[in-house]
Image (cartoon, grey):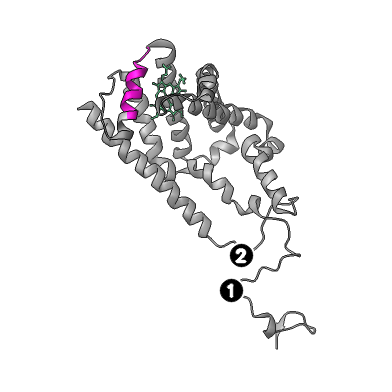
Amino acid sequence: MLTTVYALLYYVAFAVFAGGIAWRVYEYAKTPQPANIVTTPAPVTRAGVVWRMFKEVLFFESLWKSNKWIWIFAQLFHASLWLILVRHARYFIDPVPALVVLAQPFGKYAGLTFVLGALGLLARRMFVARVRYISAPSDYLMLLLFLGIGISGLSMTFVNPVDIVGVKAFFLGLMTFNWQPLPGSPALLIHLGLVALWMLIFPFSKLVHAPGVFFSPTRNMVDNPREKFRPVPWMPAVSEVSFDPPHGTRK
Ligand code: HEM
C-alpha cells in the first residue's frame, strides 16, 4: 500500500517538476526583450556576459557586493544543496560513478551546513525588520520545507539509520517500472513526502529562480544599446521618420 502511494506520488511529482520547469523555461525564452535594460556596468560582448553569469550563478557576485551576511548564509545553503544532491545520486545511478563516491563524506556533512544556512536565512526574515516587511507566508514556508527535508535527512544519517539499499531498489524500480518495496521508516516517509512536495511546488514558486536567473534581462544582455539597433513593433519604420529638426518626428 505504502509502496503504491509513494510510487504514484513520485511519478506525479516528477512529471509536474520536469514538465513545469520545461513550461516555465519555454515561457521565459519566448518573452520578448524589446529594450536593452541590462544593469550597468555590464560586459560589452557575449563572452563577457557568459563570464558574468558564471560568477553570478556560482558565486552570487551581486549579492557579495550588496550584503556579506546574506551572502554567507546563501552560499552555505546553496553550495551544501549541490553537495547533498551529488551525494544523493547514489540512490538513482547504478553503478555509482567515482565522483559521487568521492562526494559521500562531504555530502554527509553538507547536510549540517545546509540546515545552518536555512536557519540563517530564516532568522534574517524574522529579525531584520525591512526584510520581515516584504516577506510573504510562502517565503517562510519555503524555508521551513527545506528545514524539514534537511532535519529528517540528518535524523536518518546520524540517529536512525534506514535501509538505504532498499531505498535505492525502490527508486531504480520506479525508473524501470519494476516496483520494489519502499522501506517503511517514519523519517524516510517524512523525508520523501516533503521532497515530493518540494518537486510539486518548484515550478510555481520562487524556487524557479534557479532556471529563471539565466533569463533575467538585466543580467543576460550585452551592454550595446548604441551599437545594436533594436527595432520594436510600435516604432515607426525608419523610412517614415524625418531626421531633420525636430528630431524623430513623422513627416
Ligand atoms: C527522491 C529524492 C530523495 C531521496 C530518495 C532521499 C533519501 C535520503 C536518504 C535515504 C537519506 C539518509 C542517508 C544515509 O543514511 O546515509 C537522506 C539524507 C539526507 N537528505 Fe535526502 N533524499 C532525497 C532528496 C533530498 C533533497 C531534495 C534534499 C535537499 C533539499 C535532501 C536532503 C537530505 C539531507 C540534508 C540528508 C542528510 C545528509 C545526508 O546523509 O546526505 N534529500 N536522504
Q: Which of marks 2 and 1 is nearer the N terminus?
A: 2
Q: Quadrant of the C terminus?
A: bottom right
Query: Which residue is labeled 2 in the image?
Result: 34
Where does residue 179 sit, x and y in percent of width and height? 25, 30
Where does residue 94 sit, x and y in percent of width and height? 41, 26
Q: In which quarter of the image is the N terminus?
A: top left
Label 2: element kind: loop
Using the image as rendered, state which of residue 183 and residue 232 is in the foreground.
183
Q: Do the residues labelled 2 and 1 touch (CB within 8 Å)?
A: yes
Q: In which quarter of the image is ligand 1?
A: top left
Is 170 colored magenta in this rendering? yes
Q: Quadrant of residue 6?
A: top left
Q: Residue 233 carries which label?
A: 1
Q: Which residue lies furthest to the right in this view?
A: 245
Q: In this view, does 20 lie to the left or right of 9?
A: right
Where does residue 241 sit, x and y in percent of width and height? 70, 83
The residue at 56%/31% (across/down) is 78
Is residue 37 visible to the viewer in this orientation of the structure? yes
Disc 2 from disc 1: Cα separation: 9 Å
The residue at 49%/44% (across/down) is 208
Task: Report the magenta residues as a range.
Answer: 161-172
Q: Is residue 176 left or right of residue 32?
A: left
